[in-house]
Amino acid sequence: MAESLEISKGASREVVYAELAPQVESLVSDEPDLVANMANIAAVLREAFGFFWVGFYIEKGGELVLGPFQGPIACTRIGLDKGVCGRAYSTRETVIVADVDKFPGHIACASASRSEIVLPFFDRQDRIVGVLDVDSDRLDDFSETDAAGLRRILDLLDVEEVSR
């Protein structure tokens, strides 16, 4: 992959996700280091969409621990049953929150965050490894289009195993 992304200006999110997928695949396919790949995926997503915050939390010792991210300083540790990240982790399902102020138990790592989408990701044995957390500074900024596009990109991560 080149040092820059090739995306259509003004295109719909669906089109941008479709354009990003092969570029991300090229970026991560020959790199075995999970942390490096997560770091680049966070950077790609923030650059392509201008999201407020994009990052990974990895389960370690019964908590979600901050991994590679792009954006302002973040919460370092989140309980497996706390906030939007904990809900996505514990249910193993994508969680879309249109207004974080209306989500019971939302963890406000940054007051500028207004909406959020969190997707769990898994290793080769379908064990949950952690979550991808994306925040927007706009209300109701995420949809099923984002869920599908982000899932496609997350599925490109080849997670053999993670030391916990």
Image (spheres, rainbow, N blue to C red):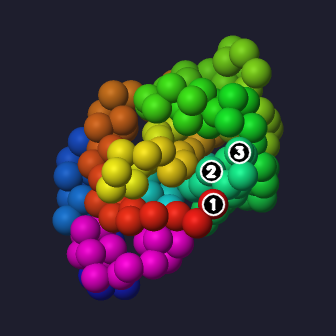
Residue depicted at x 49% and y 76%: 36
Other-residue count near label 2 (Cα within 10 Å), few / some / many at <14 / 14–19 / ≥20: many
Q: Name the residue carrying label 1.
A: 164
Question: Along the horizontal axis of the image, is 24 left or right of 142?
Answer: left
Say if mark 2 contacts mark 1, CB within 8 Å. Answer: yes
Q: Name the residue carrying label 2.
A: 59
Q: Secondary structure at mark 3?
A: loop
Residue depicted at x 76% and y 21%: 105
Other-residue count near label 3 (Cα within 10 Å), few / some / many at <14 / 14–19 / ≥20: few
> Does the magenta run of residues contain 29?
yes
Say if mark 2 contacts mark 3, CB within 8 Å. Answer: yes
Q: Name the residue carrying label 3.
A: 62
Give amino acid for label 2: Glu
Q: Please say if 61 is above or below 33.
A: above
Which numbered disc, 1 or 3, marks the residue that appears first in the sequence? Answer: 3
By secondary structure, the bulk of the magenta-drawn segment is best described as helix
